[in-house]
Image (cartoon, helix red, strand yellow):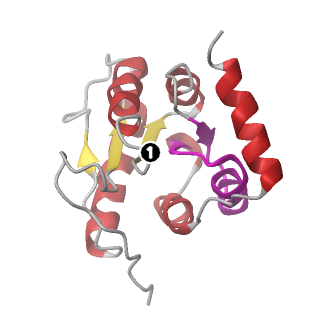
């Protein structure tokens, strides 16, 4: 039995909160619904669903990535999970937003390293290529892995922040 992850979730307007946002286009819609249930029932975490609210095969992933990115950057402790068919489109889009560090979560180990070393705040999942159980394990690792504040990682993140100014 998995132990619940202990994250403090409070009201939207609190500056000290951790909020978890989740969004997908049609390509990740079914997996997103599964992950929302998994987060609520297994990890006892309420994720804020930013859409799509219903399946629409003609929707566009940039709309959902932008909505989620805007929410995540409001507080440095916020996190987000984006899904599309291959995960790459939402990842590219999210990384266009200043302050977002999005990574493609194709397996548990890569996700752990992305969180620890690169302080990733948005996890992008390739819904077409992950089972629901594997995706859930990746999300769990994303949420439970702390940032590593080793000097070399901090130095690298400062360089990335400088690049964002171009």
Give the image location of residue 81, x and y in percent.
44, 45
Residue 21 position, x and y percent, is: 33, 45
- Residue 94 drawn above or below residue 77: above
Q: Residues within 10 Å of mark 1 (few under 14, many from 20)?
A: some
Q: Is residue 127 above or below residue 161?
A: below
Q: Nearer the viewer, residue 107 or 79?
A: 79
In the picture, residue 147 is in which quadrant? Answer: bottom right
Q: Nearer the viewer, residue 144 or 10?
A: 10
Residue 136 in the image, given as x and y percentages of width and height: 47, 63
Residue drawn at 58 percent across, 36 percent down: 101
**Which residue is outermost to the top?**
166
Where does the magenta region start and end? Answer: 101-126
Q: Residue furthest right?
A: 152
Q: Which residue is mark 1?
A: 76
Judged from the image, the secondary structure of the residue bearing numbered disc 1 is: loop
- Give the quarter of the figure containing the N terminus: bottom left
Residue at image position (58%, 66%) is 145
Figure check: 67 above or below 2: above
Lateral position of residue 152 relative to residue 142, left or right: right
């Amino acid at each position: 039995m998995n132990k619940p992850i202990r994250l403090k979730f409070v009201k939207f307007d609190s500056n000290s909160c951790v909020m978890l946002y989740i969004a997908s286009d049609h390509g990740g819609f079914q997996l997103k619904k599964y992950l929302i249930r998994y987060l609520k029932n297994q990890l006892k975490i309420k994720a804020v669903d930013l859409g799509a609210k219903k399946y629409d095969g003609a929707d566009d992933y940039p709309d959902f990535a932008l909505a989620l990115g805007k929410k995540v950057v409001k507080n440095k402790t916020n996190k987000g999970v984006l899904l599309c068919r291959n995960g790459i489109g939402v990842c590219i889009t999210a990384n266009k937003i200043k302050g977002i560090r999005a990574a493609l979560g194709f397996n548990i180990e890569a996700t752990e390293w992305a969180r620890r070393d690169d302080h990733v705040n948005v996890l992008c999942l390739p819904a077409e290529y992950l089972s629901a159980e594997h995706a859930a394990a990746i999300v769990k690792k994303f949420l439970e892995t702390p940032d590593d504040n080793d000097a070399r990682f901090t130095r690298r993140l400062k360089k990335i922040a400088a690049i964002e100014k171009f």
